[in-house]
């Protein structure tokens, strides 16, 4: 069946996500410090450093959104759900999932149009010789991954039986 | 009308337990689609550019520095030092916990991180020494809020970024209010210690004080690097934050040796996770603020307030009430992001200093961290104390009296916030 394959793909995605985030954050930090050292030690620095850092940061956050769903990092307001019956909790989870997916869909739509416009313009980033549409192209992908993770996270509450049968 | 829909949609989504970030973003998008001419492209572009605001880059670096120092025994040594200084007083261990929170706040830019760093050691320690777990949790939950008042501070970074106020000035302005709040909490502990007949410990001799002080100095030097570096113009706040992270790495791996090199990636992953959680909220809060701005909400609100002819003191009451309310339901950085652009022009028109406004907002956000339903400090305190959330809330609320008193002083005595930045400029 397809379920084990999906799970294997997701497992690999887990590793890739986490490794990317570790590398990205370390890289940003070191690059920024190197820039300070170069400025005082050698009176210069890389022109591209700042732009590379800010794009790395954007990618870190975009990839991290879905990582945050998996590791339950995103905070929500808990006014009512802790006192709900299982049925009502499921209804709440379903509505929250629909809202999350709607958000992702709209962001995918908006950001792919944004990337498409940059493609038409075809210009490069300010200091690095890479087209801007490549640098922003991660955005629709990241929101698609976020949607995937939202479904994955909601499965145990919404479809407990399907999750149980996966494990057998 | 449009603004009404925006706020209603936000609260409806929050109530349905949609994550805060998505609630902010989705309510902004829906409002935009229903009422405004702007396209989704503009929002997507706005979101991406929010993730590239240079001053905000200080956030991941400060979080990374904090994560390294929390796992790397910096907090442990600060606690030992604090304990050797004040442990012999009645209620000494509680005072040491409070002082340790203030010391750790001087190297950490986040309140929940301060609670975790000190609380994970001290709550159990105080419980062993005859304090109730609730008392320990309540105190540290509150004292941990110093994390964003005593520099560095993530909330001040966000305020500085959106209002284009000097982050260095804001940091320095937080010092006196931070010390004042520490002293006020210290007095509260001393009074309680007498009433509850809390235990003291044997007095530490001078040698112990010096030894623990020498151990803790590596961590404490960090604040000197940060403030000194920013103020002397050696580096920007963002660079200072990156230097802190590398410095913290060197200290915990090579000087203290508490973290093994192969354990570092896990700490970095943890910091990256916290960073993206915060930045995902911030990016969406930018969308929310963007919709408010395109709908001219800040402009019409400030016009309205100006027309009312409110005196500054009355405006400040309104400001505090609004921020306290918002702080209950939203996470601190998003409150600052949404409210700072609205309040800033009004405050400037009334002659309130931008730095003073920033400190008032920071103090309100501290209170927001311990007021349910959304109080990050409450959540993490419940985690480190293993007490249920409701017990933590009960334990933390009485201390709010002290924080409110500090808020009133900071609001109406601008001198407290402005004395240091003015003296230095």
Image: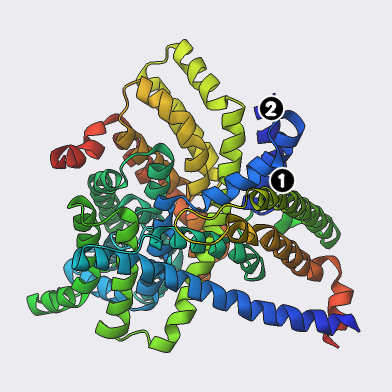
Q: Between residue B244 and residue B383, name the one nearer to us.
A: B244
- Sequence-wise, the earlier of marks 1 and 2 is 2
x 42%, y 57%: residue = B57
Above or below A138: residue B403: above
Q: Position of residue B408 (x, y in %)?
A: 34, 34
Label 1 in the same subunit as label 2: yes
Image quarter where the C terminus of chain B lies is top left
Task: Kindly give the residue lying farthest to the right in the view shown.
Answer: A1
Read off the residue under disc 2. B2
Above or below B292: residue B230: below
Q: Between residue B173 and residue A92, name the one nearer to us.
A: B173
From the viewer's perspective, tell me whether residue A135 is left or right of residue A142: left
Tell me if mark 1 has few (under 14), some (14-19) or many (20+) residues whose alpha carbon lies within 10 angstroms of its own.
many
Q: Position of residue B156 (x, y in %)?
A: 37, 47
Q: Between residue B413 and residue B5, name the one nearer to us.
A: B5
Q: Between residue A18 and residue B310, name the one nearer to us.
A: A18
x 23%, y 50%: residue = B179
* Parent chain of label 1: B
User: Which mark lies nearer to you, 1 or 2?
Assistant: 2
Residue A72 visible, this orientation: yes
x 11%, y 75%: residue = B210
Give the secondary structure at mark 2.
Answer: helix
- Quarter of the image where one finds residue B406: top left
Give the secondary structure at mark 1.
Answer: helix
Residue B110 visible, this orientation: no
Above or below B158: residue B245: below
- Quarter of the image where one finds residue B249: bottom left
Distance between mark 1 and mark 2 Cα atoms: 17 Å
From the viewer's perspective, tell me whether residue B342 is left or right of residue B356: right
Read off the residue under disc 1. B13
* Parent chain of label 2: B
């Amino acid at each position: 069946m397809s379920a084990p394959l999906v799970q294997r793909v997701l497992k690999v995605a887990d590793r890739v996500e986490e490794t990317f985030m570790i590398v990205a954050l370390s890289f940003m930090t070191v690059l920024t410090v190197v820039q300070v050292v170069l400025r005082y030690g050698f009176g210069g620095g890389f022109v591209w450093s700042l732009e590379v850092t800010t794009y790395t940061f954007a990618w870190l956050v975009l990839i991290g959104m879905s990582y945050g769903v998996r590791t339950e990092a995103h905070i929500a307001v808990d006014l009512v759900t802790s006192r709900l019956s299982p049925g009502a909790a499921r209804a709440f989870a379903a509505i929250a999932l629909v809202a999350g997916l709607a958000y992702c869909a709209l962001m995918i739509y908006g950001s792919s149009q944004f990337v498409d416009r940059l493609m038409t313009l075809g210009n490069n980033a300010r200091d690095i010789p890479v087209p801007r549409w490549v640098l922003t192209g991660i955005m629709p992908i990241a929101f698609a991954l976020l949607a995937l993770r939202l479904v994955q996270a909601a499965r145990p509450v919404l479809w407990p039986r399907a999750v149980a049968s996966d494990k057998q | 009308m449009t603004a009404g829909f925006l706020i209603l949609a936000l609260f409806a989504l929050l109530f349905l337990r949609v994550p805060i970030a998505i609630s902010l973003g989705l309510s902004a998008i829906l409002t935009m689609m229903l009422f405004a001419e702007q396209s989704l492209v503009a929002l997507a572009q706005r979101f991406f550019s929010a993730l590239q605001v240079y001053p905000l880059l200080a956030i991941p670096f400060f979080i990374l520095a904090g994560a390294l120092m929390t796992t790397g025994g910096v907090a442990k040594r600060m606690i030992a030092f604090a304990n050797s200084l004040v442990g012999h007083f009645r209620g000494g261990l509680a005072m040491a916990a409070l002082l340790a929170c203030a010391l750790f706040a001087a190297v950490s830019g986040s309140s929940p991180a301060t609670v975790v760093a000190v609380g994970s050691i001290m709550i159990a320690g105080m419980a062993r020494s005859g304090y109730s777990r609730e008392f320990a949790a309540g105190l540290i939950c509150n004292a941990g809020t110093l994390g964003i008042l005593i520099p560095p501070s993530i909330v001040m970074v966000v305020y500085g970024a959106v209002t284009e106020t000097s982050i260095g000035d804001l940091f320095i302005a937080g010092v006196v209010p931070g010390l004042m709040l520490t002293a006020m909490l210290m007095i509260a502990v001393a009074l309680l210690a007498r009433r509850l007949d809390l235990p003291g410990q044997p007095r530490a001799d001078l040698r112990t004080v010096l030894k623990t002080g020498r151990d803790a100095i590596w961590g404490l030097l960090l604040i000197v690097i940060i403030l000194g570096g920013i103020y002397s113009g050696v580096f920007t706040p963002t660079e200072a934050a990156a230097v802190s992270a590398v410095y913290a790495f060197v200290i915990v791996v090579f000087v203290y040796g508490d973290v093994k090199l192969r354990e570092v990636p896990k700490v970095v992953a943890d910091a990256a996770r916290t960073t993206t959680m915060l930045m995902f909220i911030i990016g969406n809060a930018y969308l929310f603020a963007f919709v408010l701005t395109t709908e001219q909400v800040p402009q019409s609100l400030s016009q309205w307030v100006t027309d009312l002819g409110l005196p500054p003191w009355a405006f400040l009451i309104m400001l505090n009430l609004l921020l306290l309310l918002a702080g209950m339901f939203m996470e601190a950085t998003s409150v600052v992001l949404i409210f700072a652009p609205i309040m800033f022009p009004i405050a400037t028109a009334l002659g309130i200093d931008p730095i003073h406004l920033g400190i008032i907002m920071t103090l309100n956000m501290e209170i927001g961290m311990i007021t349910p339903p959304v109080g990050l400090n409450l959540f993490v305190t419940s985690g480190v104390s293993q007490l249920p959330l409701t017990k933590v809330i009960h334990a933390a609320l009485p201390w709010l009296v002290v924080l409110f008193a500090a808020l009133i002083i900071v609001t109406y005595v601008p001198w407290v916030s402005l004395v240091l930045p003015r003296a230095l400029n």
